[in-house]
Amino acid sequence: MEYATYQASSCDVIELQTKFDAETVNDVRGHFDHLIKDCAGDVLVDMSSVSELDSSGIGALVFLYKRLKIESRDLGLLGVNGKPDELLTMLRINQTIKQYDSIEEYLSKK
């Protein structure tokens, strides 16, 4: 899976591409571990390009959320739309992991 990472203000951003499912979760797991262990700020996962999400992807997001919470850090999701948004809403994960339309919206609420 291709993904990009960058820093924005006080957070680290990982931008996922196309799908986040059983086939692609392992590709980003190492980077999730890096974000947990080696970075200090909040983490944003940009999902604006993600069109497919399954239980493995959701499990990885929940795992990242829980690990960050232990360290009093937050996880936010950017640009979730389409089927991934429907799935996160149906499972009520959107009530726990905050979703933002843009980095600017995230920064304005901090």
Image: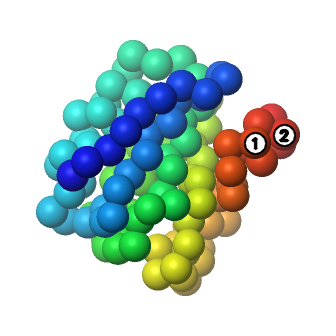
Quarter holding residue 31: top left
Task: Please name the amino acid that badge 2 sits on.
Answer: Ser
**Residue 20 in sight in this render:** yes
* Residue indicated by mark 2: 108
Specify whether 3 is left or right of 77. left
Q: Position of residue 59 (x, y in %)?
A: 35, 60
**Residue 67 in sight in this render:** no
* Residue indicated by mark 1: 104
Question: What secondary structure is marked by label 2?
Answer: helix
Specify whether 49 is left or right of 31. right
Q: Position of residue 19 (x, y in %)?
A: 31, 65
- What mark, if any, has residue 88 been given in the picture? none
Task: Please name the amino acid that badge 1 sits on.
Answer: Glu
Q: Position of residue 74 (x, y in %)?
A: 61, 38
Specify whether 52 is left or right of 45. left
Quarter holding residue 96: bottom right
